[in-house]
Amino acid sequence: GFIDSPANATLDQLQPFADAAGRVFHSLPETNFSFQITSPEESFGGMVLKPWGVRKQPTSAFVGPVMMKLMQIPGIEMFPIMPPALPGGGFMPVEFYICSTAEPERILELAEELKMRAMKAGIFRFPPPIDTKIDQPESQIVIDHDKVAALGLDMKQMGADLSAMVGGNFVKWFNISGRSYKVIPQVQRVDRLNPSQLENMYVTGPNNQLVPLSTIAKIQNRTVPRSLNRMQQLNAVRIMGVPTGGLDAALKFLEDESARLLPQGYLIDYTGESRQLRAEGNKFLPAFALAIVMIFLVLAAQFNSFRDPFIILLGSVPLALFGALLFTFLKMPNPNVAFFTDKWTTTLNIYSQVGLVTLVGLISRNGILIVQFANELQRQGRAKLAAIAEAARTRLRPVLMTSIATVAGHFPLTLVSGPGAAARNSIGLVLVGGMSIGTIFTLFIVPSLYMLLAKEHRERSLAYAPALAPDGNGNGWKKA
């Protein structure tokens, strides 16, 4: 997690808080070890949990308890987060930029207003940090040039004296007893704890006489930003946070509120996981549509017809998708209430999307078995109704065998636990749910659509075989 400290904090001031955070990490029995990186402005630390074979809970289950304990440490803000699943992004899922040519102070005001609206709507788990903070105290030495000229002082020499006293710059190496040491001139720490002590320092005057700095300069204090960010060659302020729900919902809220809040001339942008979602998250629908079109064209070439592929896809794919997506909506509205569906849910993630594309090809096979056999029966002289009824009865066992084999093969994925279980659960639930529910409905919907939309293949076969005559039983035709 992050430790957000005041702008003028020192390492000595931050160390007790970092130690307190370390004690929180080690208070959990599942902690293997912890680490910390402490700096004056912002500190970072984390905990590495014990292996899955030792603990029973997933990593996400520890974020809430750790956050509650960190919030009890007074005097500082600490935010526990989970690292992203894929490397290369930021530390937080939401990384939202507001960009403009306006002054950073104005952009920061709008970012704070957007942050307040998001917290009021319950979008984030904790107040999202904003990387631009205008709270850094700065002291400026304002030199009276008239007094400098009157006393005959050299500005270059004055700068060198002040740099040597407070700059802490490296000068040279010093060798003693076979070892080399850096020479860094600087006044003692007790003499440079606050800006007012600068006035007690002396600079070199004419004839090497020392002149008090207070006689030729005064100290002006002001507040400046800690850092200024740029994005797309514009001034930018970044809002970072961990959403309570899905990342897409959080970004959608920020986008909608930004459209209402930001005046003309302001832009929004993303980095990290947010940019990845916006750049690649909308590619599933085109890929899914392309899969449908490719299957349709292949079936059209196989059946030499556009109607039969339409019957196959319309009678199987929508209902299979319903069965697959059903497992993304079974979660109870209150996640704190135990329910039997809690362990049988997934989200619409990259793994479930792969499962949906795979499901289209698997479920289409059931419709192919029925429609193809019905067409063959019609060509043999059966009526359309008799042909589709016979095809549904005859192909029932092959359809059930292939569906049961698919479900049985993927069902173990729904029971997996441990590292990487979420990915396997997503694929397993989508394929098991889609094949189970889709197969049941396919046996009823495909014959109905066949009767409604399919061609009369018997009439076409009669045109090429005029010597056929009814068999007298109403079931077909025989040679005359």
Image: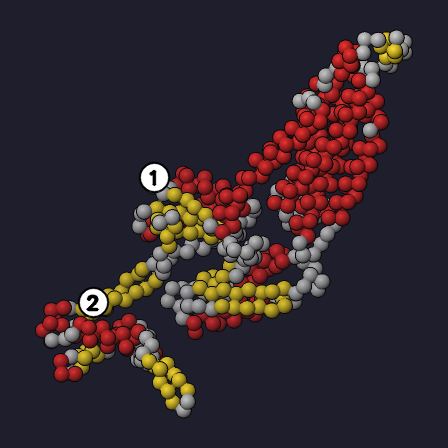
Asked whether the viewer can see residue 136, the reply is yes
Amino acid at pointer 1: Gln
Q: Earlier in the sequence, mark 1 or mark 2?
A: 2
* Residue with the mark numbered 2: 142
Quadrant in which the C terminus is drawn: top right
Instruction: Residue at 43% x, 74% y: name it.
Output: 12
Amino acid type at mark 2: Val
Horizontally, is 451 left or right of 353 in the view? right
Number of residues whose C-alpha sits closer than 10 Å to that of mark 1, classed few (under 14), some (14–19) or many (20 or more): few
Q: Residue at x 42, y 48 (%)?
A: 97
State the residue position of label 1: 264
Q: Residue furthest bottom?
A: 177
Comparing 419 with 6, the one in front is 419
| Residue 28 in sight here | no
* Residue 288 in picture, x, y percent from top left: 61, 36
Identify which residue is drawn at 69% across, 37% down.
359
What secondary structure is found at the residue carrying circle 1?
A: loop
| Residue count near mark 2 (Cα–Cα under 10 Å), binned few <14, some 14–19, many ≥20 | few
Residue 126 at x, y percent in the picture: 50, 54
The answer to which of 226 and 167 lies nearer the viewer is 167
Question: SS class of the residue under badge 2?
Answer: strand
Q: Which mark is residue 325?
A: none
Left or right of 112? Residue 154 is left
